[in-house]
Image (cartoon, helix red, strand yellow):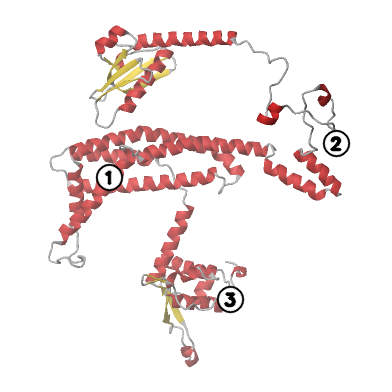
Amino acid sequence: MGASTLGTIDSKPDGGPRVDGRDFAPFSYLTVPNAALYRGVMDAFMLAKRRFTVHMRPEDVQEALGHSPDLSVIADAMARLVDWGNLRADPDTSRVTTVEDFHRARFLYQLTRHGEAVEEAVARYDEALGRRGALQAVALLDISTQLRALAELANHAEPDPAKVHLLLAGLVGRFTDLADNAQAFMGSLQRTIDLQDTAVEAFLAYKDRLIDYLERFIKDLVSTGSEIARLVESIEVTGVERLLDLAARREAEDAAPGGAPPGIDHSDDPREREFARAQLLWLDRWRGFRAWFISEHRHPSQAKLLRAQARAAIPALLQVVAALNERRAGRSDRSADFRELARWFAQAPEEADLHRLWRAAFGLTAARHLVGETESDRAVPPSTPWITAPGLTISPRLRKTGSYERRGKPNQVVDRSAQRRYLAQLAAQEAEQTAAARAALATAHPTRLSDFGQLDPVPFRLFLGLLGDALAARTPGMKTVQVTTSDGSMAVLLTALPGGRTAEIRSPDGVFRGPDHLVEIIDLTDDGRAEASA
């Protein structure tokens, strides 16, 4: 800490602020003019505490600050911290050799409980401001692993309370870390997109890694998040309240006697009071965890919102890159043009030059004459002054309505018949391809997805759209769903199959894999099939 930033000690304040009867004097050193000096002194005491040093003298603090500022300034600062309650001063008699030394004020200083609490709060504040966070795909895997173990315990008639409690505590800790880090990362990402906390060169250097990082997390969130949602639903089916009660009961075993609120009989069993409190706490934790991965009616899950925010960040990053490239390529914008124009105005030698520059820049030249309806009116050159120009004949229709019909040959109409025929041919080809795809996908009876085998590109794209509509319409707990396409041409009946079998459908574009389902696809344009289905 340089001496240039440290001045004389400010005058002693009358006292710290008080809010609702609470004394906030230990926070006073953060807002006074010489806050940098006080922060340095308190940092020296916190460093000494981490090294298991209890007491410090002013010369010890001076050494920790790099022998600056003067010892008297540091001693005065430590005295002010004692007045505010951050430090405690004890007489130092260990180095007394004469009577004069005994009467000279010498103190040993140490942190008070209030001073240490303030420093911890300030350190936490600085950490929160500088935290960038991360999208923890590993945390998603840990959560799914713990949920699988919890689902196994839920199937037991009498699960081990210790194992249940440890799993739930680990689950809460890992989930809290995941949510906090994701929130911090998305906040720092938005600041990066706004170019508020990063240099241009650094942004261009790491934007590819950042986009790849976002894409990998989105992929993991989709796959692992759906597995977590299924595990949560399976645990709730077997009875999650029983597991939460076991964890709350285990925490209540260590409840100390007494401590009941005013008006409560202290003769009650403190373990029952602690159990009731812990029971509500664990239930709230589970509800928050469930809402993070499972969407409710009109309330999308936090994982879905985070996925949408991460997806939206990718095009935003690309837009920033495009803007930076344009700026680096030397392309000017309107603000730069106006600044350059202002310099030209400031450097103009004469007032006449200012007027010429104004007309050239903004096009505010002399007003042009109106174009009349007669040949003599059109023959007047634009340079003719208004005072010497002949009168202009104005049509009554123009005077009344502000417009008049233009005389002369009408504009030619462009023949678009060739383009219309081409568009009609494209529409007919697309209709034929769609009809052929419907015929290829229509099933005479419910069929497994794994029995479809291989599909051509057009039927495969139509099949993906039908399957996506059916899966989007299915809600948690629903085994069978039936939907109709928006054009009313096809209906899909999808039924989930037990056993966890994986289906594969091959196409020239790749291999589609997913959980096997029983599907029936009905071509509603076929009257016979539509009536049979009805």
Mark 1, mark 2: which one is toward the viewer?
2
Identify residue for label 2.
385
Placement of 14 over or under 123, stated as above or below: below
Q: CA distance from mark 1 to mark 3?
A: 56 Å
Q: Amino acid at mark 3?
A: Thr
Q: Residue at x 80, y 38 (%)?
A: 366
Q: Quadrant of residue 18?
A: bottom left
Say few, some or many: other residues with alpha carbon within 10 Å of mark 2 (under 14 / 14 to 19 / 20 or more): few
| Residue 197 horizontal side relative to residue 434, left or right | right
Disc number for residue 287: 1
Farthest front residue in view: 396
| Residue 302 horizontal side relative to residue 255, left or right | right
Disc number for residue 187: none
Mark 3, mark 2: which one is toward the viewer?
2
Identify residue for label 3.
8
The mark nearer the N terminus, 1 or 3, is 3
| Residue 236 horizontal side relative to residue 44, left or right | left
| Residue 318 horizontal side relative to residue 255, left or right | right
Q: Quadrant of residue 403?
A: top right
Name the spot of residue 7 as percent of width and height, x first: 59, 73
Quadrant into which the C terminus falls: top left
* Label 3: which secondary element: loop
Mark 1, mark 3: which one is toward the viewer?
1
Q: CA distance from mark 1 to mark 2?
A: 82 Å
Q: Nearer the viewer, residue 163 or 189?
A: 189
Q: Nearer the viewer, residue 218 or 308?
A: 308
Q: Amino acid at mark 2?
A: Pro
Say few, some or many: other residues with alpha carbon within 10 Å of mark 3 (under 14 / 14 to 19 / 20 or more): few
